[in-house]
Amino acid sequence: MATHELIAKPDTVHWGFYDASLEPVMRIRSGDTLEVHTESGREEYLAELGTRASQNLRDIIEQVPQELGPHIMTGPVAVEGAQSGDVLEVRIHEVKTRYDWGYNAIRPMMGGLPEDFPYTRAVIVDLDLEAQTGDWGAGVKVPLRPYFGNFGVAPPPAVGRVGSYPPSAWGGNLDNKELISGSVAYFPIFNEGALFSVGDGHGCQGDGEACLTAIETGLSGTMEIIVRKDLQLENPRAETDTHYILMGFDPILDNAAKMALRETIKFLGELRGMSRDDAYTLCSLAVDLRITQIVNGVKGVHAMLPKSLFA
Amino acid sequence: MATHELIAKPDTVHWGFYDASLEPVMRIRSGDTLEVHTESGREEYLAELGTRASQNLRDIIEQVPQELGPHIMTGPVAVEGAQSGDVLEVRIHEVKTRYDWGYNAIRPMMGGLPEDFPYTRAVIVDLDLEAQTGDWGAGVKVPLRPYFGNFGVAPPPAVGRVGSYPPSAWGGNLDNKELISGSVAYFPIFNEGALFSVGDGHGCQGDGEACLTAIETGLSGTMEIIVRKDLQLENPRAETDTHYILMGFDPILDNAAKMALRETIKFLGELRGMSRDDAYTLCSLAVDLRITQIVNGVKGVHAMLPKSLFA
């Protein structure tokens, strides 16, 4: 199996959207490994950052049009043999920080408490890459736990060009902090080649992504990409070493929680042939509903189902 | 400091409500330790349980009127010197299972997915007290992690007799699975003596309490009860060895999340003098919003703030 490196630069990124009509920037085979790099940033930070901002990021900001959403997405990568109806398995072998800086922004009309914080407040966060901490001023250093906030496949062609902001069936802006090194994500495929893209590097984030953004920063990821013809999915799923993760998305958090529950009940039926009643109760006893994020228009709830229940 | 044992029996419980006008069943001093026992059960299970159901539970079911809610509450306990405006600190030294059985119930019009499960389905769950597991049929044993789902102080007198079902400022049906042995809960006090009650023993529960109930079972708790005159609270708070826990309650989960965030931002200001902007961002980077429960009419979100951030 081959390994392919994909640098984020003007001709390998799309900014702010997913679109099935994008030409792939790379073609790989199922089972190949992708070493992919992402950039995060905005024009407004470049003066303060000076040479800390990479030339690739500067070139992207200068040359690539931003449409619909804020995320600089590396890709899309076409995977040979992938067909609509298949599943793309993404084994995240490693996610690493690239730079010694990130940023965090509060913006008006957005975030978890838009009524309380109706203004912009953007800060550059210094990262200590050796200690793997972010210097959150106020005497507090936060431990880094890097992961990609936004990744997935191209949406169904009929959806057209869709903003990178709300998560959906094709993945996208999941902002699920569990998808770190060692986790596996599964996406339903809607297009030939799957058309996988990744961006929105997060140095760290709490469940909820309360203020709108995490520590937004450039990351490098090593991912094994596999086309699964033996699986069928309507929505993304994931797993860690210790948990299966089932997801719910909806503009209303109450509905996202219901979807996450329904996905978990369905999954328990597939995994163990468990009755719906038994699965519902098992969720009540042993599955944790966590708030993935409340800030992407479409909110997220993820259900954490411990693998140890079945040991 | 004295230790007082309080058994749950017909003259030491109230069933289904909180009420400031209830006569205390015991008086203790601030700093005293309460060894308190709770019973959980309903008439419909007694035939199947036979002698597994304690005589105290049978007496309660026969003699005590149930009003408004389902929880058999032991108490209220009056704490000398407690005044409205003070805070009651409850240090949970130990919570233990009492019996080899519990139950789980799905009921129509209730639970996280009332549309999908419009019927009653009640099961007795066998508990292995040595292994500390519950036998959830379907080949799955769930680890026990006992805690009291429902505890708190009497509500303001103007509230009158209020159901034990929705959580509120005085605590009540929090169903917060973090409040195990070693945790500390803080409640605002609204009445002379505080009038502390406890019930709704849970053998284990996932965040969300998806189907309506946990493993409902009798528990014994050892709690140090302290009146704090140096604190002021509008809503309950808690802490574990590793986290501060701030809470949000609302019939709409989105609003509960906002309340939990606002409580966390306020707490960070009190704890560290942190600016509101800094606190909001710190929530985004390092505080986890979890769904406490979606099944008590008033839903809950709790924010987990790691103490390690301030080490």
Image (cartoon, coloured by chain):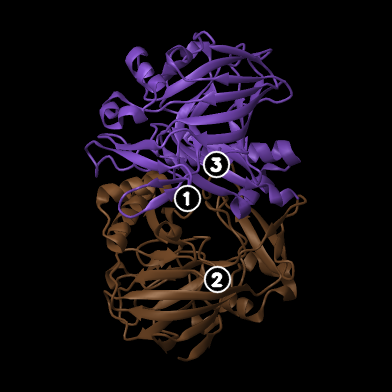
Chain colours: A brown, B purple
Tell me, yes or no, whether dots 3 and 2 are on the same chain.
no
Distance in Å between CA atoms under marks 3 and 2: 27 Å
**Are the residues flagged by discs 1 and 2 in contact, CB closer than 8 Å?**
no
Vertical arrangement, residue B189 with respect to residue B117, above or below: above
Residue placed under numbered mark 2 in the picture? A181
**Nearest the camera: A60 or A259?**
A259
Instruction: Say which quadrant the C terminus of chain A sits in.
Output: bottom left
**Nearest the camera: B27 or A41?**
B27
Residue drawn at x 59%, y 35% is B94
Tell me, yes or no, whether dots 1 and 2 are on the same chain.
yes
* Chain that bears disc 1: A
Q: Is residue B206 visible?
A: yes
Q: What SS does tag 1 mark? A: strand
* Chain that bears disc 2: A
- x, y percentage for residue B137? 31, 49
Q: What SS does tag 3 mark? A: loop
Give the label on residue B178, or none.
3
Query: Which residue of the protein is positioned furthest toward the right in this rendering?
Result: A139
- x, y percentage for residue A224? 46, 80
Q: Specify the quadrant of the image occupied by residue A142.
A: bottom right
User: Disc 1 or 2, which lies upstream in sequence?
Assistant: 2
Residue placed under numbered mark 1 in the picture? A290
Q: What SS does tag 2 mark? A: loop
Q: Amino acid at mark 1?
A: Arg
- x, y percentage for residue A173? 46, 63
Viewer-side label of 1, 3: 3
Residue density around tag 1, few if under 14, some if 14–19, many if 20 or more, within 10 Å: many
Q: Amino acid at mark 3?
A: Glu
Q: Amino acid at mark 2?
A: Ser
Tell me, yes or no, whether dots 1 and 3 are on the same chain.
no
Residue drawn at x 29%, y 24% is B43
